[in-house]
Image (cartoon, rainbow, N blue to C red):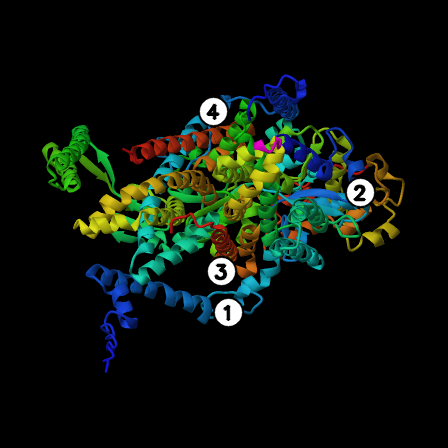
Amino acid sequence: MKSNMSKILTTAAIAATVSATAGAATLDDVKSKGFIQCGVSQGVPGFSNADEAGNWSGIDVDACRAAAAAVFGDAQAVKFTPLSAKERFTALQSGEIDMLSRNTTWTYTRDTALGLDFTAVNFYDGQGFMVRNDLGVTSAMELDGATVCTEQGTTTELNMADFFRKHGLSYVPVIVQKADEALAAYASGRCDVFTTDKSGLAAHRSKLADPSAHVILPETISKEPLGPVVRHGDNQWKDIVTWAMFVQVNAEEMGISSKNVAKIKAESKDPAIRRLLGAEGNMGESLGLGADWAYDIIAEVGNYGEVFENNVGPNTPVGLPRGINNLWTEGGVMYAPPVR
Amino acid sequence: MSENTNTNTSFLNDAGNRALIFQAVLLAVVVFVGYYLFSNLQANLETRGISTGFSFLNEPAGFPVLIHLIEYTEADTYGRAFAVALINTFVISLLGIILATVIGVIMGLARLSNNWLVARLATVYIETLRNIPLLLQMFFWYFAVLAAMPHPRNSIVFGDFFINKRGIYSPNPQFQDGSGFVLAAFLLSIVGAFFIVRWAKARQKATGNWFPAYWASFGTIIGVTLLAFVVTGFPVEFDLPSKSRFNVTGGMVLVPEFVAVLIALSTYTGSFIAEIVRAGILSVNWGQTEASRSLGLPDGKTQRLIVLPQALRVIIPPLTSQYLNLAKNSSLGAAIAYPELVAVVMGTTLNQTGQAIETIGLCMLVYGSLSLSISLFMNWYNKRMSLVER
Amino acid sequence: MAIEFKPSPSLPPPSDSVGPVAWVRANFFSSPLNIALTLFSVYVLYLMIPPVLQWGFLDATWEGSSKAACTAGGACWAFIGAYFEQFMYGLYPETEYWRINLALILLIVLVGMFAIKAVNKLFLSIAIIVVYPIVAFILFSGGMFGLETVETSNWGGLFLTTLLGVVGIVASFPLGVLLALGRRSNMPIVKSVCVVFIETIRAVPLITILFMASVMIPLFLPEGLNFNKLLRVLIGITLFSAAYMAEVIRGGLQAIPKGQYEAADAMGLTYWQSMCLVILPQALKLVIPGIVNTFIGLFKDTTLVYIVGMFDLLGRIQAANHDANWLGTTIEGYAFAGFVYWIICFGMSRYSMAVERKLDTGHKRK
């Protein structure tokens, strides 16, 4: 026991990283490290996924990249920690990561009771069901008696149970430790239905042998606003992560993208755009950042529309329609406060 | 260490005193570390707003469980879900232990067989399974079982039995009035069988005449129970499984998760038990076998009456630890959706309530008690079997 | 004229009791039951071997860049080829593989030096238990001496499996010795602390310990201090295997005759002197096979870290199974993992048997 303690203490001395405590400046911590430690999922195509060479991509990954672009002017200054659904909050609370961007649903309990703060929503989602085409099911109401596969450790389990109870349908639950195994069980015919957030369904469908043989049912049985999370009490850091997202939405509204941002910065006469891109004044100062913070985000990561198209849009294997994630001007719900 | 009674030594050089001081220091360190960890825990729970205590066990769980041998719905409490998981762990452990023992004994004897081919096959089985991680075997069996079975639409049908990817469906007996009488008859016949065996043993000791007590008692149990069935007019109705839109409904079902966990646990542990059985039999002196043969006992009886009872003394202690391993390894069922303790309590419940300390503590307590009861039972059995030295 | 007596040469034994024919008869067809068993075994072999050969070798595809290349209908070993480096090194950067290889070679050389008579075993043990881990740690994580830093979340594959197994055993060894001595101590408090620790750990599954490591350790640490996850898991594995190690070593201590203890006391040696100079060297020699067996068990158990979200060999294979280019290669993945684990564990168990035979002083009944 004694030797044990001394071992723990010495290893702590070697390997412990003194993280920012609540209320302390994560920004200073990040700047001194030179990178952002970003918690992501262990592989959801289009949201956070590593290829064979270990390069990460996805919407959730880009949220961290945008924050890195704002802080360092370098979207690559991010290191990723893949986390399971179970350990994500512990990792953030204990300071193992600086921000959590892991298709995490913004709920009352999580925002108030866990010592966490949700920043902005980067994807509006809802839980749905995926079934095989050949079952001829067109609505979730017809699922009486079906076997349902899902992953353990998310809000999905409860939503599923609530939905079936509400409508008085019987079902057989198969709850697997990890999403990938749950999908494998569904693919092998163990289940009729696979359920998770609709974005996840599309992502998982792209992993199946013949994606076109599976259909996502129209019903959305829950509200799942997904977005990056930071520790409670560090307002400056929360502002940076929040506004990195808002800048991308505003840029899309103004028609600024990574392709034309340099040209617009040089030529635009619009004071709002000039302020945003740091051609006039210094908007970044109040965040503790440089004048180019927003310019760097757009130039290196792109506007929200680009992020969506590159990762989950119709031309990617995930193939999600823009739907309610369209700008408010286009009939969606993506709406960001103005940069003034 | 003997007490040093030499009075010339200084206080610190006295072994007894040093032991006292050392222990006091150790105790202080243990208490301090415990207190330090506990105070950190308090502070952390406070800052994260996590409540403590077991009150959550009375809250509605809201999540479904695939296999429940007692009534359970989503509206039940976390405590109820815990009980369901506990029963699942218990059932898989018990069945696994029985199956693993059977497999282990057969394979252990096969490895000692004087048929060269049989012995080699058993060796290959043992050496292969022992050296591959159990978790890997679980995954293998799960996906192999799933892959081998037909889709519900093309279920294999034997009368009222259906076999498909969703499990094995069989008629579910629904006991009507009068079935209590049958149950009583069944229990009584077991007691009767016990007495038959005792009587046969006593008679053999007294007269030397051998009586096939085991066959007789087996026959008694079957016969009496069947007779009771006939007398009461078969008070059983069957709930038959039938095809529905997605699958087969009704009846009893044995799900593939259960089957896969059971196969994986019993074959894996069986390979270890086989080695234990082999070592146990080899430990019995060859002279015993020769003596038995010279008395004219046939081979089967030689094994059963002479060799095995003596081998058991060597077999039981390591067998106990294999049983313990099996009970603990049942926790790996969580990886392939078998709803046992780790999956239900340390998985879903922990996730929804955030009560890490309570849920993990509860699990450890259960496994601790399970291990303890297996140990106690096996030690009692070991005492019964141990050599009475005269 | 003495007649010399010459016995005529003995006749050869009947041809049906020696030679291959007799061997076959005794082994396969000595009784009806034996014949039945033989036929049954042959049938089992017939059921198993041809399909496996057909699938694994004859119809297998060895080259290719996606599942589409596997058209022969057999195993798709190309999948293993494509992911081989990831299975071995996880997501470790390719340019840095030499660091892992170097550490492995160093370990093999150090352990191999035990076989050389001239080397001082004590210094060698210290080198392995104290110096080597520090060197290996610097090599693996970098950040000093101009080595690029590699995050532990990128460590994986067989490298991580081996790391967990080796660190678990090496770190738990001293702890196990102390616990074993403590359990045999006649100081009641020391004894009870050790007994409680050992029996608690041995009564619960490793998975609960790993859950504790990944979920509970952060709760027990003061605000602002945290270990990275790999370290937490290593602490969990070390404590777990220390309990088993302690029991193995205790077995060795009990096997030492009482006379040795008494003789050491009679020499006027202190407790620690008598332990370190007389008892432990003899006891540890006895338990080498036990330690190797503990290591084999632990090596197999490291697969459980997959459940708490680390990517050891099994985890990497599971992840690769979900690559859209390689769908439907689950069985190949499991077969490969099984093969790798089997080679390593089987090799070690043979080694421990050999050691057992070597150390056998001849008082075991054969």
Whole-number angstrom distance, CA of label 1 to CA of label 2: 49 Å
Of the pair B127 and C324, the residue shown nearer to us: B127
Whole-number angstrom distance, CA of label 3 to CA of label 2: 45 Å
Numbered disc in front, either 3 or 4: 3
Q: Is there one chain holding both mark 3 and mark 2?
A: no
Q: Which residue is mark 2?
A: A71
Placement of B313 over or under A187, stated as above or below: above
Queried whether the magenta region covers residue B350, the answer comes back as: no
Indicate which disc residue B57 carries. 4
In the visual, does C272 lie left or right of C329?
right
Amino acid type, mark 2 = Val
Using the image, name the chain to which the residue with label 4 belongs.
B
User: Which residues make up the magenta segment?
Assistant: C265-270
Q: Which residue is mark 1?
A: C61
Q: Which residue is mark 3?
A: C332
Using the image, name the chain to which the residue with label 2 belongs.
A
Using the image, name the chain to which the residue with label 1 belongs.
C
Residue B309, image x, y percentages = 27, 41
Of the pair C280 and A110, the residue shown nearer to us: C280
Whole-number angstrom distance, CA of label 2 to CA of label 4: 46 Å
Amino acid type, mark 3 = Glu
Residue C137, image x, y percentages = 70, 47
Whole-number angstrom distance, CA of label 3 to CA of label 4: 44 Å
Answer yes or no: do the residues labelled 3 and 2 have beta carbons within 8 Å? Answer: no
Whole-number angstrom distance, CA of label 1 to CA of label 4: 54 Å
